[in-house]
Amino acid sequence: MKLFDLRGGVHPEGRKDLSAERHIRILPLPKKLYVPLQQHIGAPAIPVVNVGDKVLKGQLIATAQGAVSAPVHAPTSGTIVALGDHVAPHPSGLPVPTITLGSDGEDKWVPTETVEAPFALRAEEVAARVAAAGIVGLGGATFPSALKLNLSRNSGVQTLIMNGGECEPYLTCDDRIMRERAVGIVEGIRLIAHAVDAKEILVGIEDNKPEAIAAMQAAAGNSEVKVVAMPSMYPMGSEKQIIQVLTGMEIPAGGRPADIGVLVHNVATAYAVQQAIRYGKPLISRIVTLSGGAIRTACNVEALIGTPVQELIAFADGYAQPAARLVLGGPMMGQQFTNTNVPVVKGTSGVLALMASEIGQAEASPCIRCSTCVRACPVGLLPLEMAAHIRSADLTGAVGLGLKDCIACGSCSYVCPAHIPLVHYFNYAKGDLAAQERSKLKQEATKKLADARNERLARIERERAEAAAKRKAAREAKERAAKEAAEKAEAV
Amino acid sequence: MNPIAHSPHAHAPVSIGKVMATVLLALTPATLFGFWLYGWPAVNLWAVALIAAIVGEALVVHLQGRKVRPVIMDGSGILTAWLLALSLPPYAPWWIAVLGSLFAVVIGKQVFGGLGQNVFNPAMAARVMLLISFPLEMTTWVAPSQAPGLLESLRITFFSQPIDGMASASLLGHVKTEFTRGIGLDQALTGYYAPMDMLWGSRAGSLGETAAVLLLIGGLFLIARRIITWHAPFAMLLGVAVPALLFNAIDANHYAGPMVHLLSGGLMLGAFFIVTDPVTSPNTALGQFIFGLSCGLLTWIIRTWGGYPEGVAFAVLLMNAATPIIDQYVKPRIYGRDRKGVALPANKG
């Protein structure tokens, strides 16, 4: 198959060999699970259980709220210990609303429905079951999957792209799941295609994963699922880039893949879809890669959602040496965390304990305009210019240069010889822009309310004056009539 | 606990210091050749230029209240002085090197705000300042391979011992002089233009600009190491060679051919080490191509019709001034948008 070029891109050291040959192992059942209500893009889920309630594995414990949301299920059987705050899997480490579940050690499932003929289900029914299973994009974006299915079906999708790129260094969770659960993934892919009526199905896998490609090809057989080896380059696994490489098309600025008739899902999401549709199992666990130079035994585990990260690290035999930095996700786009009590959530693809030498951080020096960042940018931006504008607080200028088109992949920061934290500038600016827009909306709303109040007061005043004038006119008319009557009487 | 760091949590093994060191390495063969060709005076001049730049930069950075060490260690001041030294006549007196280096790092760079902030290439700004202020010292060339002894070389560099016996003229200077006497190229080049000598660098000229082949190798090394790209150097050579070829075809007696132009003066040094200066050149591939091409054209125009025999430095400074304009108009197309920045239309396939 003809592939198209990716613009820019970088070749970070892969380091996947640390964990690539380690089979997925099931993590021992933790005593307590901390399940946040928000593990997805959109509104947080609303709890439907109370403290003290006994729940079974897979039972709904929080329901979706509003149009963009996802429900949350009990990862194991046990008792609800607390409904309250727990440290978030976020750099801030701030508390977020969380359901704490004490495990009873029995790991007993709720009754689940096995569907013998899943392809006989109507497309809407597939999407509804995906929504009920709480499935979100497992590649890291955590957008509710059912919404994407419905949106794509309504807008007429031609091509379904399955993302097996896994271009982030260190991460091998998708590699392992494709090697070990290819049959389930392929059925999941076909179910997704069934739900959106896709004409063409492409599975893009980077060519640094030959075993995964072979396993997926074997599972796909002669079906309509086509496995494509892509060159290994970061950020190949980004939605915009994988579409560009496989189809030559670009998502219009500010648009969605559906605008060009494409739907992209992660391979691990396809496996979750298959589990939900065929076996009625909601999303309560995921594959996590434990790696980094400071981890003693790098490995891949299947962890229940809500498992504290420290239990994963203990399972990997702890630290070989003090970690210079702990990261959730991959090193290019992952987030640092400091509290190892943070739970595994639906979007946790990796837990990395990195040594200082792996991070390669250095103090930033002045930009020499070498334009290495320009050559590395997969979007065609001028990172050095954008950063200069942001540094002088000129956000409008930065937006004019394409700040909103930045995908925050980190390629520019990675290659910058001056070690300038370019993506940090861009995310800061995006945050500032969002805050400005919010405050503008607030101001507009305030102004509207004030205007309405002034208008109301003016109207009341006007009405009062009118009423007074009317009363006066009536009184005068009455007086005049009385006078006339008196005059008439006098005349008579 | 360290402050929370933003992604990416990995970095390519690169730094400004490494970039500068690679460029210095690429310059080394041509420099050593210059030392061999012109002897100890060339070494003295080079050393004086470097020392003056380091001391001068350290002093002004200290006066600014900034940390001196990282500024010196980034190697950019050393590179500037090195490039300047390579563009000086090898027997020039010490104070030419000192003045030039100080002008380059202080006026040319630090006054603008230091590394990355200067509009003009510091080495070329210094060279032009020297050329205009001290035309005699800056155009006194020597014929190669007359290497004086160490003691004599110290007299040449530090006590301005006359070098009449060894004086020579650069090819471009010679041609210009002969033109003013009404002598055509066919005679002027006789005995002066030996292509193989030009190629290997055995000719009168600046300290490090004569070894065309070694400079080319250094440049290709930088391209291979991805420190520079081919756009600006290739375009500059093209910008000189194409008009030279055309006009030479029209009137060979008045216009030198492309090989004479490509192998003489500071063109090779300029193409691979000056127009590739990231700070003062455009930041897109197309912009760099336009920049290089214009530098080449201007160089040829100045050489052919200008008052000075050589035009690389002037051409580079003129185009440095045009860099912000090129950057304003030449921008990459953004993903999902057309060239004008308008979002691409939706296409349901």
Image: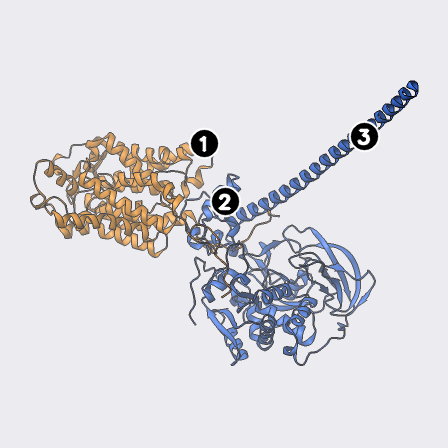
Chain colours: A blue, B orange
N-terminal of the pair, mark 2 or mark 3, is 2
Q: Residue furthest top?
A: A490
**Mark 1 residue type:** Gln
Find disc 2 in the rendering and name its residue: A398
Q: Nearer the viewer, residue A265 or A128?
A: A128
| Mark 1–mark 2 CB contact (< 8 Å) | no
Q: Quadrant of residue A68?
A: bottom right
Q: Amino acid at mark 3?
A: Lys
Q: Is residue A416 left or right of residue B301?
A: right
The residue where tag 3 is placed is A470
Instruction: Kindly state the secondary structure of the residue where label 2 is placed.
Output: helix
Q: Are marks 2 and 3 on the same chain?
A: yes
Q: Amino acid at mark 2?
A: Ala
Which tag is nearer the camera, tag 1 or tag 2? 2
Mark 3 closeness class: few <14, some 14–19, many ≥20 residues within 10 Å: few
Which of these two is toward me, B65 or A420? A420
